Structures are given as C-alpha cells and as structure tokens.
Amino acid sequence: MAGQRKSLEHLFITFLGIFSAIAVYSIHAGEAKQVPSVYIVKKGDTLWNISQRYLADPFLWPALWEMNKYIKDPQWIYPGQPLMLKEKTLVPSVHDNLVPSVHDNLVRSEHPGRVVKLPPPMQQPDAMQSEVPAPISEYLINRDLIDSCGYILPRKELLAKEQEEQWGTVIDGQEEKISYSCPDVIYINKGKNQIATGALFTVFRTQDMVFHPETNREIGYPVQVVGIIEVDKVFDKIAMAKITKSFSEIHLQDRIKAYQQVPLPIRSEPNAKIQGTLIASEDERINLATQNIVFLDQGTRQQVQAGNCFSIYRKDPISGASFEEDARFKEKGSPSPSPSLYPWPEIANDVIGELLILNAQENTSTAVITKSADPIMVGCPFSSKP
C-alpha cells in the first residue's frame, strides 16, 4: 500500500508539473501576441533582446533595424528612442494593400555580414484583406517624430534666432561620459532669473551648410534635434536637468532652446501647384526610402504647409533635367537646355514615391517619405500629387 501511495503521489506531482508548465507557457504565449506598435527603448535594451522579447527570435533583429531606418548603427540604441515593432501603412487609403507583417521579407542573420532572405509570407484569409489600415498617428507621424525632426535655417536667420531665443548650452553631465541619453542628468548654463524648475528645453546641434544640388546656391544649416530635457534644480548661474527624451546622443556643447510643442500635422493636399527639389536628407543618406527624413527647397512663402502631401518623381538620368524644367521650356516654345536622350521619356516622369510635410520654414520644409517604389535620391523633383 505504501508503495502504491508513493506511485500515486509521484504521478500526481508529475501531472501537476505538466499542467503548471502548460499554464506558464500559455501566459507567455498570450504576452508574446500583444506586441505594441511602438516600443520606447529602455536602459540596457538591445535590438537582439527586443527581438527575443517581442518577435520570439533574437535573430530577427535586422528586421527591427530595417523598420527603424533612423538608427545608424544597430549596436547603439538609446533610452527614450521610439522603436517601431510593426509595419503599418503611413498614409491611410482604401486603395492600399494589406498592412504588411513584421515577418514580410525579413532578413535572418546570425552575423551582420551574412543575410538570408526569408520565404514570402502565407496568403492571408479573405477576412484580413478587408481590414482598414491603421491611422497615420499610430504608425510614424506621432509626437516623437515631430519633436525629433530637424529643419534648415539660413545663415542670417540662424544668428538672429540665437539672439532672439537666447539659446543656452549643455556644459556638463552628472557622470563623466562622452555622450548622454535618457534618463541621464546634465547641466546647462542657465541660472536664476533665466529659467524655472520644470521648464522644458529642446537640445539640438547644427550641421554643415547645405547647398542646392541643382544650382549650388547656399541654403542654410540643418538643425538636428537630439533630445528634450526638463529642469530639475536651478542654481545661481547653472541648472541641473534630466534628459526626458533622447533621439540621438547628446554631447557637451550641444545647444538648448525653450521647447515649443507644435500640433501633429493633418494630411492635406496643397492649396497651389507646388514644384521643387529634395535638397538634402537628415542623416546624409544617398539612397532614400520610406521613413527617411528629407529637406525640400519650398516653404511657407511658396504656400507649403505641414500635412501637405506630394509626389516624388524620377529624375531623367541622362539629361539631368527634371520634368518640371523640361515642361517650363516647352511652354516657352524653346528646347530644353539639355535635351533628353532617354528612349522612353515617360519613364523619367514616373512617380517613385510620396512624402508628407512635417514642418515648414519660410523657404524650406522638412518631410518624411511615406511611400517609395524605387530608391529616392537627393536631387529628385517633387510636385503636387497628379
């Protein structure tokens, strides 16, 4: 009897262990399915462990890198950065295809230099085909994108704004480091009678002068926004502040100015026929695609407004003239200054992408590429959608 009792006890413990394992697995499986659209990077995170946590496979880290093109080096991500975990349609349209999954066309890699294309995903059921794409604010056009996108200031305007807005400087950090990020503590050269506890500041730096790719005329200095800080303590001549958001590394001598929240752009069509050129990219990329930030040579003076949508066109690769230039000369009855030898002229006018204006200055504007069918480059023309 004693032996039989022990056997029953052993069997009961075995079944209890199995049921416990199943319960734990079910809980974790349920958690794994609840993948957020955007994840805010925390201290100690890496693309590897984030892929393990939300995609159930650490080797899918190249997929996250591909979806978050603003990350220049996959080995360096910083607390406070927004990380997209799901791909959705940027600009909602009833004609858009089904929202792609994170597993569409992924690259699986054990080493950064070794990539293998995954097979195409299985066809979705008919019920899924009729789903309406997510609103624009749920994907990329959110508060973090608007706060982090830069802009271009002409030389004179840059100097005038520095005096008018009384820019300050990051002078030190609580820890001795080369760069800082959320939630590090830094010191700024603003003291009593200048700022108050709780004040928010934008941290930024200026980059090299941008010249127009067609005319080579001077445009201005790109302003790169790297973070947002909140003043914690104010002393006589300096103040201590906590980094609440970091979009890139924050360095000593970076500039600060009072934070101003601007409304999220609402998608709209331009009020006038507007044509122009992509003059630069935010991170100096050569080949541009969806999610990349670009600068344009048209602004509020040309009636460009935040939220406006434009088409991006392929530039004639032989003549070097954009379709707008050819059209202007044809209207005047004179030949184009560089006649196109392209055997299929209509191809030079193909729409290869779309963009949406994030903010507009007087003669320039900042936009995000919302769609790209082919590689887009600085110098490509853009125009009101046909």
Image (cartoon, grey):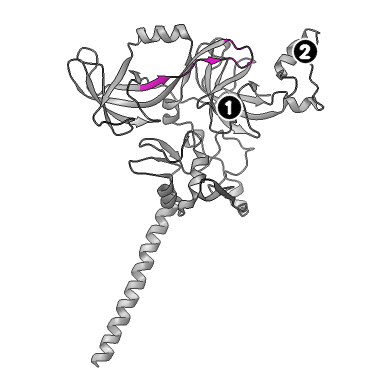
Q: Position of residue 18 (x, y in %)?
A: 36, 72
Q: Tell whether 148 sits left or right of 381.
A: left
* Magenta stretch, residue numbers: 203-217
**Magenta highlight on residue 216:** yes
- Residue at label 2? 336
- What percent of the width, then of the height, locates residue 116? 58, 51
Residue 255 within the magenta-colored segment of the rendering: no
Instruction: Answer whether residue 194 is visible to the viewer in this image.
Output: yes
At which x and y percent is residue 383? 65, 20
Residue 213 in the image: above or below residue 73 = above
SS class of the residue under badge 2?
loop
Disc 1, disc 2: CB below 8 Å? no
Task: Give the position of the N terminus as an image quadrant.
Answer: bottom left
When asked about the image quadrant of residue 125, the answer is bottom right
Q: Which residue is mark 1?
A: 355
Q: Is residue 225 above or below residue 22?
A: above
115 sits to left or right of 234: right
* Disc 1 from disc 2: Cα separation: 27 Å
